Image: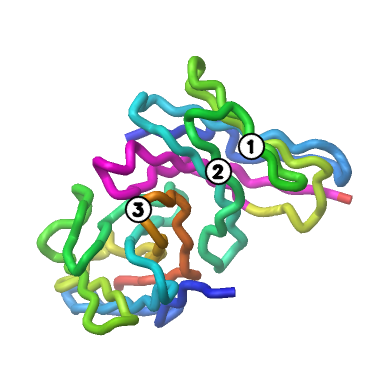
Amino acid sequence: EPEVTQTPSHQVTQMGQEVILRCVPISNHLYFYWYRQILGQKVEFLVSFYNNEISEKSEIFDDQFSVERPDGSNFTLKIRSTKLEDSAMYFCASKGTTSSYEQYFGPGTRLTVT
Amino acid sequence: DQQVKQNSPSLSVQEGRISILNCDYTNSMFDYFLWYKKYPAEGPTFLISISSIKDKNEDGRFTVFLNKSAKHLSLHIVPSQPGDSAVYFCAASPDRGSTLGRLYFGRGTQLTVWP
């Protein structure tokens, strides 16, 4: 069964450093998302991406964040200068079509900022 | 931002019994609702969904009920099995034409099914 994959599973970085989180969505899916979950809190939407551009972003997704689909398979989230409060699980998700609602999530990347 | 609420952080049920997980929402624009299950160190796994034009959707042991007037939905698991022990998230999506599918999540309910 097709699945969303994410690398790395755990990333430790120092405050102020740049990190890139990588995702490979399900191959025939068209919509891509990043969510995050701070420990003990709910899963929060960051950004959606369709047709090679951002379609929506939340108030969390400020200028420190960017997304890219550099090729036909990868979808990346970059945090330019990490802060302690960026420590969280980051989940990538994808969905197939406009008429579908179900998003399929990857296993997540645990980002720890020290 | 508490548009989707799961007021019970935990639920403990004996194997074979019914598990009922509840979810409330405040945004009238939500028109599609989903339940996800999450095991530790894994991502949320899609379980079952329901459109606002329906009041019930069933898939095997899982049934979701939607009460639009009360802005309430529930997930029933019958019979419950130990493998169902996980965190269950309720999620909602507004009209797809306006947001292309952003999901709003509740905080989750930890279900424990004991033998």
Residue in the picture at 22% in, 49% down: A58
Residue in the picture at 27% in, 58% down: A48
Q: Chain of mark 2?
A: B
Q: Are marks 2 and 1 in contact (CB under 8 Å)?
A: yes
Q: Chain of mark 3?
A: A
Between the C-alphas of marks 2 and 1, the distance is 7 Å
Residue A82 part of the magenta-drawn span: no
Q: Which residues are magenta?
A: B87-114
Instruction: List the residue tagged with mark 2.
Output: B49
Q: Is residue B57 above or below residue A81?
A: above
Q: Secondary structure at mark 3?
A: loop
Instruction: List the residue tagged with mark 3.
Output: A98
How far from the left and from the top, in percent, is residue B4? 43, 34
Between the C-alphas of marks 1 and 3, the distance is 21 Å
Q: Crowding at label 2, few (<14), some or many (≥20) Cα neighbours within 10 Å?
A: many
Q: Crowding at label 3, few (<14), some or many (≥20) Cα neighbours within 10 Å?
A: few
How far from the left and from the top, in percent, is residue B30? 38, 32
Residue at the farthest top position: B69
Which mark is drawn over residue B98?
none
Q: Chain of mark 1?
A: B
Between the C-alphas of marks 3 and 2, the distance is 16 Å
